[in-house]
Structure formats: C-alpha cells, structure tokens
Image (spheres, rainbow, N blue to C red):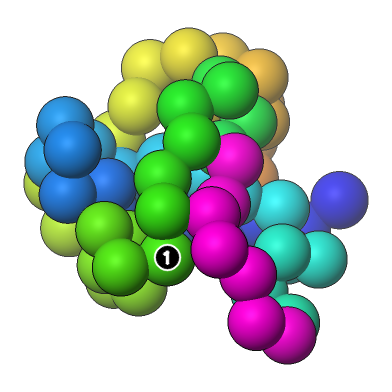
Amino acid sequence: MPYVWWQSEYDLQCHAFSLDQTEGARSFYEAVCAHSVPDERVSRSQAGALCTPCLIKVGTELPDARWRV
C-alpha cells in the first residue's frame, strides 16, 4: 500500500498515513503506528523526524530521496 508522510503537530514527527486516507474530507487521520491526528493538526508536508514505529512497519517505502541517506 502506498503511504504519504505528513507531520503531526502533536509530536512534530513525520508519520506514514495510508494513501486511501488522503481522499475526501476526514475529521482525523490514523498513522501506521496508530498515532491519530485531527485534520486541523496535520501538516501535509514531510517535515520533522520520521516516526520510528511507522518506519519499521512501512519498511522500505521511504518518503523521498532526502530521507534515503
């Protein structure tokens, strides 16, 4: 499953969210690690440290080249 990496304004970490959550209006989003964020507290950008539990669960589907060092 494809993922997007967005920053939670709760913990300022970048979490993996399944792509199927990006369509339509939602009141909250749930990351792969079970971290949930209301719509108004999610930043749709790849900023901050990557969430380790999300990385472990997602595996090799890193967000973009700048994270693959």
Q: Nearer the viewer, residue 52 or 31?
A: 31
In the image, residue 3 above or below residue 10: below
Q: Residue at (56%, 21%) from the top-left corner?
A: 33
Instruction: Tell me which residue sits at (54%, 54%) in the image.
Output: 28
Q: Which residue is mark 1?
A: 39
Q: Quadrant of the C terminus?
A: top left
Whether residue 34 is situated above or below residue 14 in the rendered picture: above
Q: Does 3 appear above or below 53?
A: below
Q: Report the magenta residues as a range.
A: 24-30
Dividing the picture into quadrants, the one containing residue 25 is bottom right
45 in magenta: no
Q: Residue at x 48, y 14 (%)?
A: 53
Residue 37 % position (x, y): 41, 45
| Magenta stretch holds residue 29 | yes
Q: Quadrant of residue 61?
A: top right
Q: Is residue 2 visible?
A: yes
> What is the crowding at mark 1: few (fewer than 14 residues within 10 Å), some, or many (at least 20)?
some
